[in-house]
Amino acid sequence: MSDLITPELVTLDKDLGTERSSVIRYLAEQVAAQGRSTEVDGLYADALAREQKTSTGVPGGIAIPHCRSKAVTVATLAMARLSPPVDFGAKDGAADLVFFIAAPDGADQEHLKLLSKLARSLIKKDFTASLRAAQTPADVVALVNGALGLGEAPAGTAGAGAHAAGAAGSAEQSSGAGARASEAAATLGTSGTDTTGPALDGGRATDTKVRRLVAVTACPTGIAHTYMAADSLVAAAKERGVDLQVETQGSSGATPLDPSVIASADAVIFAVDVDVRDKHRFAGLPVISAPVKRGIDEPGEMVEEALAAAQNPNARRVSGTGSDQTDDDGGRDSIGGTLKRALLTGVSYMIPFVAGGGLLIALGFLLGGYLITETADTVVLENSLANLPAGGLGEYLGAVAFKIGQLSLGFLVPALAGYIAYALADRPGIAPGFVAGAVAGFMGAGFLGGIVGGLLAGYVAMSIGRLSVPRWLRSLMPVVIIPLVASIVASGLMFLLLGGPIAAITTGLNSWLSGLTGTAAVGLGVILGLMMAVDLGGPVNKVAYSFAVAGLGAGSVDNQAPWQIMAAVMAAGMVPPLAMALATALDRRRFSLAERENGKAAWLLGAAFISEGAIPFAAADPLRVIPASLLGSAVTGAIVMGTGVTSQAPHGGLFVFFAIGNFLMFLVAVIVGMVISALAVIALKRYASSKKNTVAAQPVAA
């Protein structure tokens, strides 16, 4: 196994600027310089994208930026001890110890386990103290290898040997999450309480009931935060005399908690940024749920909340049907939050059907002409490659592409409804949701009917899943009872009461959109443009995008209004990142080094319709960037709608040019909006800058 870290990958007491992006860039360069990455830009972009999902600063002056990247050839650690420290988002201040974990896309399990073990080690004070006292890069390498069990810690380094043993034990607990607490007492991962008998107090048996908790930790990358949260939670539980067993669902694999451990638990903690695998195992347990980073920053509070929930008969419980979702702060979703989450889930699962179907239909038009809508069925059924139609190979392939796309779009409403129901009720909601969506499509209720049908199916399935039933009936609930009853109720209501009125509303809406011309169309374009730029990928942006995507299937040669709305949304969403890229090129003095680096990436992000490419700029200067973005996006949306530009693709930006009608005007609209926003942000930075910003800009310009 190649060395994870070498002295050449260690930087001590160096000033790397004040932005985390500059630190990450420097460390990516070190990795590439040692031949462990094929390119700097790709590794830097992947690491920065991961950092923007969740900040990697943790308590104790530590940061662990990390990523899996195709640019990485060898699993690598690069370390920097910073002077001055840099803010990586930890609540207790800036970080002076930064470990950059770069893993290949296909990293083997042994490497991933070692990387995870290091992440867990960094929450130990004796280890971090030794790192801060290290005199040379070689000392740091020896400390890290000692912690990973790959070598000896340097002589005279306080606590290093004890740390290495503790880290090894911690990793052992991770792989055997369901083991008894008494067997894991030497590790960081248990409370040290014997869970099979009465609690011990000074060696004497007592009648005090052992408090038991279980937890699941998971983050999108599954390398660092997953395991650090697990160890932080267990350490906090140990301080409180609580037995806590953790299942880490990370990249190096997951060993499910033993069912007997779950059955004996008083409550469960979910410290996760992704869905919990097989959540139904915890059904009935009181639950505390929050992002994985809270498990690192506030483990004690989460343990206390779980203990309180265990004593509260009205506490929120895992239903096993997806109804236990939470807001980011760990509290229970409001009705509005639940609806938003469900709708966005439905749209996200629907998009692949729309994307593939829309692009194939566009390709069908390109190859077979617009008359393919009338001839596709006949051409596909009566011809083949050996028996081409009168229009030749182009017409035949166009008909095939059009028909596949048409069939794909046929799943639009059922998929939307099915996955809205899934977001509310988990797997038992999928079947009734799909059925309700199919009923909506059959009755002409369109995507509005799909939304209503999905919500009905989801809430009915969720309500049935909460019923207390005999044990012998529980196994039938998710596969027979819930799908059957929820399908009857939701689809029955669609047929008997709701389908007709919703179909009438849908017909009226389509007629209104089809009739939009002139000022009305321009006004709608302005509104859509403002929505796309106001929060750059946030809830308002997603509402506008979801509206456009959900209506895309209703577009046709005779009714191009939905395609125009999609074009307006896509063009307006491209403007903010492109504008920031242009602004950093036109007036470099007004932007920091990190922003100029982000500006280079923003060209590609904007061209591909990734509005989030402007987020780093908006986060650093929202009062200037957001108004400028609003102005340019509104103008772009107005131009697109006013000139009748269409898009049959829901995503892709300039890369799906063949699916965009009047592409030249689409390009003009994007360029005009980009220039307006770029000039606006430069003007705001130049003439509306505070004294603080003016002073801060001087070192950048030098």
Image (cartoon, grey):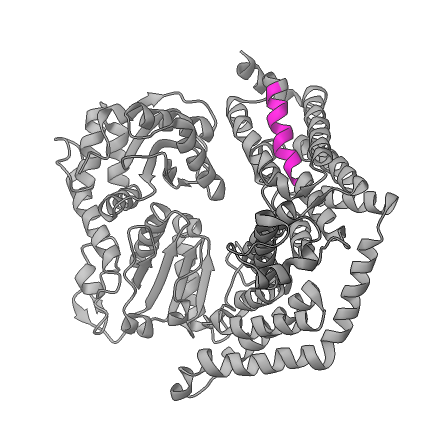
- Residue 342 appears anywhere in the view: no
Instruction: Please state which of residues 616 and 74 is positioned toward the viewer in this rendering.
Output: 74
Q: Main secondary structure of the magenta part?
A: helix
- Residue 451 appears anywhere in the view: yes
Instruction: Please state which of residues 55 and 39 is positioned toward the viewer in this rendering.
Output: 39
Relative to 149, is 340 above or below? below
Residue sitting at x 72%, y 31%: 668
Left or right of 645 in this view: 214? left
In the rendered image, residue 288, in percent from the top left (x then y), is placed at: 45, 63
Relative to 281, is 150 above or below? above
Residue sitting at x 57%, y 79%: 486
Residue 382's quadrant in the figure?
Answer: bottom right
| In the image, farthest residue toward the right | 519
In the rendered image, residue 567, in percent from the top left (x then y), is placed at: 69, 44
Relative to 667, is 171 above or below? below
Relative to 535, is 372 above or below? below
Q: Which residues are magenta?
A: 573-585
Residue sitting at x 32%, y 39%: 103
Left or right of 603 in this view: 664? right
Instruction: Please state which of residues 20 and 133 is positioned toward the viewer in this rendering.
Output: 20
Left or right of 87 in this view: 367? right
